Structures are given as C-alpha cells and as structure tokens.
Image (cartoon, rainbow, N blue to C red):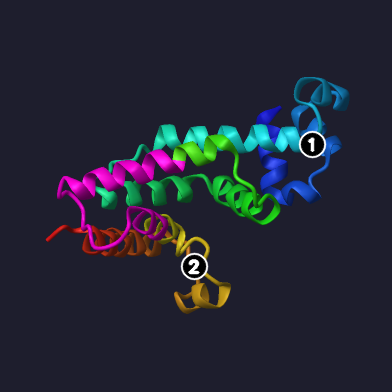
Amino acid sequence: MLAAATEEFSEYGLAGARIDRIAERAGANKRLLYVYFGDKDKIFDAVIERQIGLLAETVPLTPGDLGSYASARFDYMVKNPQAARLAGWRAFERAEPTEAERRGYKAKVNAIAKAQREGKLYDGMPALDMFAIVLRMTESWLSAPPALMAVAGKDPLSSARLRQHRKALVEAVRRMTDPQ
C-alpha cells in the first residue's frame, strides 16, 4: 500500500492524489487504506516518513567528508526520482516540518559543526548554511530549469551528463568545505 501511495503522491502531490487510485494501484479496498492509515494526509505523512528513513539509511552523513555525502545523495536522487518529486511536493504543500525532520536536520548540522571545530571542515561559515548549500547542490542539476537543461543538448539526463555533473558537484563541495 505504501508503494502504491508513493507512486500516487510522487506523481500528483498531496492535493492531486486520489485514494481510489492508490487503492487500485495497491490492489486493495479503499476502506482498508482508511482503516490502516487514516485520512489522505496521514497516508502522505507515512510516505514522507518512509522516504526520509530510506534516504537516511542509504545515504548516511559523513560530516568530515561532505563531498562523499553529496555524491551519495546525488546518486540516490538519480536512482530514486520519486524521492526528489516527493520532496518537491512536500515542500510545496506542507511548509511545517515534522518533529522527526527537525531532529534529523539538527543532528546533521550539529555533526557538521563538530567536524568544523575539529578542523575537518572549513569553519568560515555556519554549519547550518554549509549543510543547506550542500543539500541544494546535490539536487541542482536534477531540479534545474528546463531551459538550462536544454543547453546540455538532446539528453540532459544521459549517464555521461550525470557523470560530468557528479564530478563537478564533488569538486565544488570539496572546495567549499576544505579546511585549508
């Protein structure tokens, strides 16, 4: 059921998703979804929490090496386009973060601040800003405006183009975070 809901929400967002389509995709009765999860908002929350958990499990933060974190997160987003779409819908349709999201981000920012204090990362900017910039950089090509992607040519998501961008991403993060 969560897989079907993930497909539906990544395609249509919270507002456009339909419980009957989720039930149909899951091969389940619509009422069963309501019994198991509650309303559509709670199903969306369950999908988002699952995606956050999968991302955190698959791409653990390496606070002293944000280049590795950035490349792993980029790779994850390339392999899991639903995750990127869900993140976009979530930001657009739900401005208020969950407590789990707050805790997760706070732990990452604190780990980066510790790495800065230990001399493993550049300390000339707040850890919060460093992490925010790295996060956006990991999605920069995947969420680039269509006109910019068109500059890349016929297939802006080809494996060659993605490898080229990944290399540039890692170099940019390394230069931004290098303590030297």
Spot occupied by residue 149 in the image (x, y as percentages of width and height): 50, 72
Closer to the camera in the image, 2 or 101: 101
- Going by the numbered disc 2, the residue's amino acid type is Asp
- Residue at 79% x, 50% y is 15
Q: In the rendered structure, which segment of residues is drawn in magenta?
A: 105-133
The residue singled out by tag 1 in the image is: 40
Question: CB atoms at circles 2 and 1 under 8 Å apart?
Answer: no
Mark 2 or mark 1, earlier in chain: 1
Q: Is residue 163 visible?
A: yes
Q: Main secondary structure of the magenta part?
A: helix
- Residue at 18% x, 58% y is 178
Is residue 4 placed above or below 174 in the rendered structure? above
- Going by the numbered disc 1, the residue's amino acid type is Lys
Q: Secondary structure at mark 2?
A: loop
- Distance from the alpha carbon under mark 2 to that under mark 1: 36 Å
Marking on residue 155: 2
Q: Is residue 106 magenta?
A: yes
Q: Is residue 120 magenta?
A: yes
